[in-house]
Amino acid sequence: MANHGHHDTPAQSDDAIEAIVPMIPVVLPVVGGLLMFLLAFIAIYVA
């Protein structure tokens, strides 16, 4: 029974990672777009 209790903690961390991984194809383009707009704003402001 004690081993089952220790097994729950890695399973929770695996579940957290597995919950984040499907979001990567959505998050990367959004962050990339925001970064491009930020860099363009800085370039226009400085120029």
Image (cartoon, helix red, strand yellow):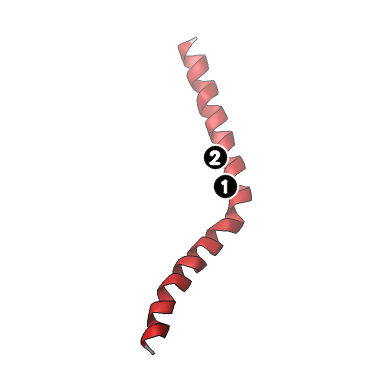
On the image, the x and y values in percent for residue 32 come to 57, 36
Quarter occupied by residue 28: top right
15 versus 24 height, above or below: below
Kind of residue at disc 1? Val
Left or right relative to 21: residue 16: left
Query: How far apart are labels 1 and 2 at the CA level?
Result: 6 Å
At horizontal 59% and vertical 35% (from top left) the residue drawn is 33
9 or 19: nearer the viewer:
9
Kind of residue at disc 2? Val
Q: Quadrant of the N terminus?
A: bottom left
Please report contact status of discs 1 and 2: CB closer than 8 Å, yes or no.
yes
Q: Disc 1 designates what residue? A: 27
44 versus 7 height, above or below: above
Which mark, by number, is residue 31?
2
At horizontal 58% and vertical 54% (from top left) the residue drawn is 23
Residue furthest to the bottom in view is: 1
14 or 32: nearer the viewer:
14
Q: Secondary structure at mark 1?
A: helix
